[in-house]
Amino acid sequence: MGRGLGAILNAESRTNINSATDEGAKTLVGNIVEVPIEDIYPNAGQPRTYFDEKALNDLAESIRSLGIIQPVTLRKDGEKFEIISGERRYRASKIAGLAAIPAYIRLVNDQELLEMALVENIQREDLDPIEVALTYQRLLDEVGMTQENLSQRVGKERSTITNSVRLLKLSPSIQNGIRSGEISAGHGRAIMGLDTDEKRQILFDRIIQDHLNVRQAEQLAGQMKNSPPGEKVVKQILVPNHVKKAQKELSDLLAVNVEIKTAANGKKGKIVLDFKNEEELENILAHIR
């Protein structure tokens, strides 16, 4: 795929190359070459900090069988090469025992390196919502992009970026819940609709406890937002039609008021039977018997 080790293991490639006019630049810049693994080092500003070990080993096995299909992208840094994108491929190649890997060489400054690494990272499909939000925030803070610039750069609506970044205002425990998959980013946005950390934590706990979907979480958030401080929200959420039907049938059969309370997933619940006196209780027991 590349030009081979000979294309880079010469005096020219071992010198500093800072611009396209520097000596040796034409040999490397803009070309795909084979670069020794030992001459490559990761970008310290790499947005991704966690690399799944099993996924890396699977990729290493694929590389052993098929080689590296997509070259990594590097920048020249003295006698070494810094990774712009492709750290997973680099790590897996080391596991696979490769001595050199194909790489596309670019000339970029530190600011451009950070921007390229962040933008490349944001396009990945396996990032969790908090990783995505952190990457957006770094592009806004460290690269100095506006939300409008960022929207154009990554091909996302401004509202998408705004909603994503807002997740970073959630408490660490709720952010961890999103990262681990306990709740979704949609749940997180519903939680953000509440104005105190206490209410947000209560809603987070209810979402997990009752297996609420995003719509149910939004409804409960609306109830909590409109309830007086300290008042516990006990209103039933989205009673399914089959539960309403069962309530009516039991109420007609027993001649008492019946309430069926279910968890959001419908897998468990309880039936509450109201009776006014001993006669109504005996009537209920008679039907049960």
Image (cartoon, grey):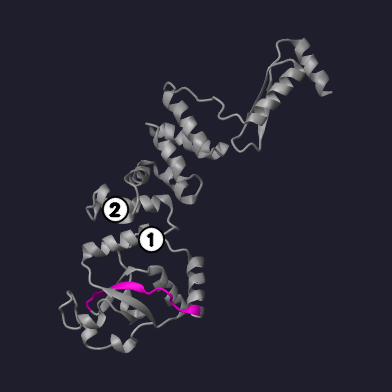
User: Residue at 48% across / 38% down in the picture?
Assistant: 204
Magenta-drawn stretch contains 77: yes
Image position of 224 with respect to 85: above or below: above
Segment colored magenta:
66-78
Say the numbered circle drawn on residue 204: none
User: Residue at 16% across / 83% down in the picture?
Assistant: 23
Left/right placement of residue 261 relative to residue 189 reads right
Image position of 153 with respect to 209: above or below: below
* Residue designated by label 1: 49
Image position of 27 with respect to 213: above or below: below
- Tag 1: Cα neighbours inside 10 Å, few (<14), some, or many (≥20)? few
Three-letter code for the amino acid on which mark 2 is drawn: Gln
* Residue designated by label 2: 152
Q: In the structure shown, which secondary structural element does the residue marked by tag 1 occupy?
A: loop
Give 120 or 224, whichever is nearer the viewer: 120
Magenta-drawn stretch contains 91: no
Q: Position of residue 203 (x, y in %)?
A: 47, 34
Q: Position of residue 208 (x, y in %)?
A: 53, 40
Q: Position of residue 67 (x, y in %)?
A: 46, 79
Q: Position of residue 145 (x, y in %)?
A: 23, 52
Q: In the structure shown, which secondary structural element does the residue marked by tag 2 occupy?
A: helix
**The N terminus lies in quadrant:** bottom left
User: Residue at 55% across / 29% down in the picture?
Assistant: 237
Mark whose residue sits in front, 1 or 2: 2
User: Residue at 73% across / 10% down in the picture?
Assistant: 277
Image position of 120 with respect to 156: above or below: below
Rounded to the nearest angstrom, the CA distance separating label 1 from label 2 is: 26 Å
Three-letter code for the amino acid on which mark 1 is drawn: Thr
**The C terminus lies in quadrant:** top right
Of the numbered discs 1 and 2, the one sitting upstream in the chain is: 1
